[in-house]
C-alpha cells in the first residue's frame, strides 16, 4: 500500500478539517459563555464534548492514513474488535457461547483484516458470510446447549457481519485499482468517512435547531424529518464538493453521497432498534459525547459495503 503522507491533496484535506474543527471549537467556547438556561447549557456541553471527541478521532484517522494503508487496516480492525465487544456485551449470552466468542474475537476478526491487508479480495469477500456463518452454529452445537440455540447463533453471526464484515469494507477501498488513480484509493476512504460522518453531524445539528416532526419516535426519538432532510442534503453538497478527490464527476459524487447518507441513516436506525430492544441509550461510553464505538460507526456499517461494490463495479 502506498503512502499518503506527502500527497498534497490529502494535506489540503487535513488542513481543511483542522480549520473546520478549530472554528467549531471557537463557536462552542463562545456559546458556552453566552448561552443561558439549564437546557441550553446541556446542549452546548454535549456539543463541545462531541467536538473534543472529533479532534481525537480525526487525528487518529489521519495518522492511520499517513502510514499508507496498513495503519487504516489496523485502525478499522481495532474498531471492529471494540464494536463487536460492545455488541456482545449488550446482548444476553450463555456459557456455551464462550468458545464461539473466542473464535469471533481472536481468530475470525483478525483474519478478516489480515486478508484485506494482503489484498486477498476473493477470500475476504466470503470468509465471514460463508465460512464463519457455517462455523458459528457448528461450534455452538458442539457445546451441547440447545436452549435458545438459533437466537444465540444468529446473534454472533449478526455481530460478525455488522461489526466486522461490513466495517472491513472501509479499508477494503484501499484494495481497489482504479485506472489512472494508482496510490490514491485512500481518498475514497476519506470520501466515505467524511460524507457518512458529516451526514450524522448535520442531522444532529438540523434536528436540534429545526426538528419538529419525529421520524421514528419508537426507535430513535431524536431523529426528525427536518434533521434527516437537512443532514442528507448537506452531506450531498459536501460529497459533490469533494468530487475532485474521487474518480467521480460532480453528479456521480452527488449520487454516491446520497447513497452513503441514506444507507447511513438506515444503519443508524437499525442499530438504534437493537439498543431500544435492550433498553439502553448507548452501546457504551468509550467516546465522550458520542457513546460507544458502535454509536459512532453505525452509519458506516451499512454505507461501506454498498459504496465499495458500486465503486468497484462501475469504476475499476
Image (cartoon, rainbow, N blue to C red):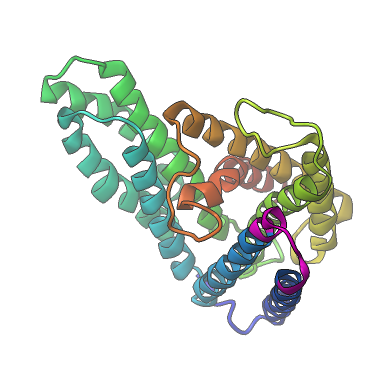
The question of residue 261 being in magenta is answered with no
Residue lying farthest to the front in this orientation:
37
Query: What residue appears at the point 46 percent right and 58 percent down from the top-left corner?
Result: 76
Q: Please tell me whether the stretch drawn in magenta is mainly helix, strand or loop.
A: helix
Residue at 26% across / 16% down in the picture? 148
Query: What percent of the width, then of the height, locates residue 301?
Result: 54, 43
- Image: 187 above or below 150: below
Please, is residue 229 above or below residue 138 in the view?
A: below
Residue 192, relative to residue 92: is it above or below?
Answer: below
Relative to 94, say whether 191 is above or below. Answer: below
40 in the magenta segment? yes
| Relative depth, front residue between 164 and 95 | 95
Viewer-side residue, 92 vs 159: 92
Relative horizontal placement of residue 199, taking residue 104 as reference (left or right): right
Q: Residue furthest right?
A: 251
Residue at image x 13%, y 24%?
Answer: 142
Q: Please provide percent x and percent y for residue 65.
A: 54, 71
Q: Give the residues in magenta.
A: 33-43
Asked whether residue 253 appears in the rendered view, the answer is no
Whether residue 237 sits left or right of residue 70 in the image: it is right
Q: How many marks?
A: 0
Question: Picture quarter containing residue 161?
Answer: top left
Q: Report whether residue 7 is seen.
A: yes
10 relative to 165 in the view: left or right: right
Given residues 275 and 234, the one toward you in this image is: 275
Q: Position of residue 168 (x, y in %)?
A: 47, 50
Residue at 39% over, 40% down: 87
Q: Position of residue 191 (x, y in %)?
A: 69, 59
Amino acid at each position: 500500500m502506498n503512502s499518503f503522507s506527502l500527497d498534497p491533496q490529502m494535506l489540503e484535506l487535513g488542513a481543511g478539517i483542522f480549520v473546520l474543527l478549530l472554528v467549531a471549537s471557537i463557536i462552542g467556547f463562545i456559546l458556552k459563555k453566552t448561552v443561558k438556561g439549564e437546557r441550553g447549557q446541556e446542549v452546548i456541553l454535549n456539543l463541545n464534548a462531541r467536538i473534543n471527541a472529533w479532534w481525537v478521532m480525526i487525528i487518529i484517522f489521519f495518522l492511520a492514513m499517513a502510514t499508507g494503508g496498513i495503519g487504516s487496516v489496523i485502525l478499522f480492525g481495532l474498531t471492529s474488535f471494540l464494536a463487536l465487544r460492545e455488541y456482545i456485551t449488550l446482548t444476553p449470552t450463555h456459557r456455551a457461547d464462550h468458545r464461539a466468542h473466542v473464535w469471533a474475537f481472536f481468530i475470525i476478526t483478525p483474519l478478516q483484516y489480515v486478508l484485506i491487508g494482503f489484498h486477498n479480495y476473493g477470500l475476504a469477500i466470503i470468509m465471514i458470510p460463508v465460512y464463519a456463518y457455517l462455523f458459528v452454529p457448528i461450534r455452538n452445537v458442539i457445546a451441547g446447549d440447545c436452549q435458545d440455540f438459533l437466537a444465540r447463533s444468529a446473534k454472533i453471526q449478526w455481530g460478525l457481519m455488522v461489526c466486522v464484515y461490513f466495517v472491513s469494507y472501509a479499508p477494503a477501498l484501499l484494495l481497489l485499482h482504479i485506472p489512472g488513480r494508482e496510490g490514491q484509493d485512500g481518498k475514497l476512504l476519506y470520501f466515505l468517512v467524511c460524507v457518512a460522518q458529516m451526514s450524522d453531524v448535520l442531522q444532529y445539528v438540523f434536528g436540534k435547531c429545526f426538528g419538529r416532526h419525529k421520524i421514528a419516535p419508537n426507535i430513535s426519538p431524536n431523529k426528525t424529518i427536518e434533521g434527516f432532510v437537512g443532514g442528507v442534503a448537506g452531506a450531498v453538497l459536501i460529497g459533490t464538493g469533494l468530487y475532485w478527490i474521487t474518480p467521480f464527476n460532480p453528479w456521480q459524487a452527488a449520487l454516491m453521497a446520497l447513497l452513503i447518507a441514506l444507507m447511513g441513516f438506515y444503519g443508524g436506525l437499525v442499530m438504534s432498534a437493537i439498543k431500544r430492544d435492550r433498553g439502553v441509550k448507548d452501546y457504551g461510553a468509550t467516546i465522550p459525547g458520542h457513546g460507544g464505538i458502535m454509536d459512532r460507526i453505525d452509519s458506516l456499517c451499512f454505507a461501506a459495503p454498498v459504496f465499495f461494490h458500486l465503486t468497484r463495479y462501475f469504476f475499476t
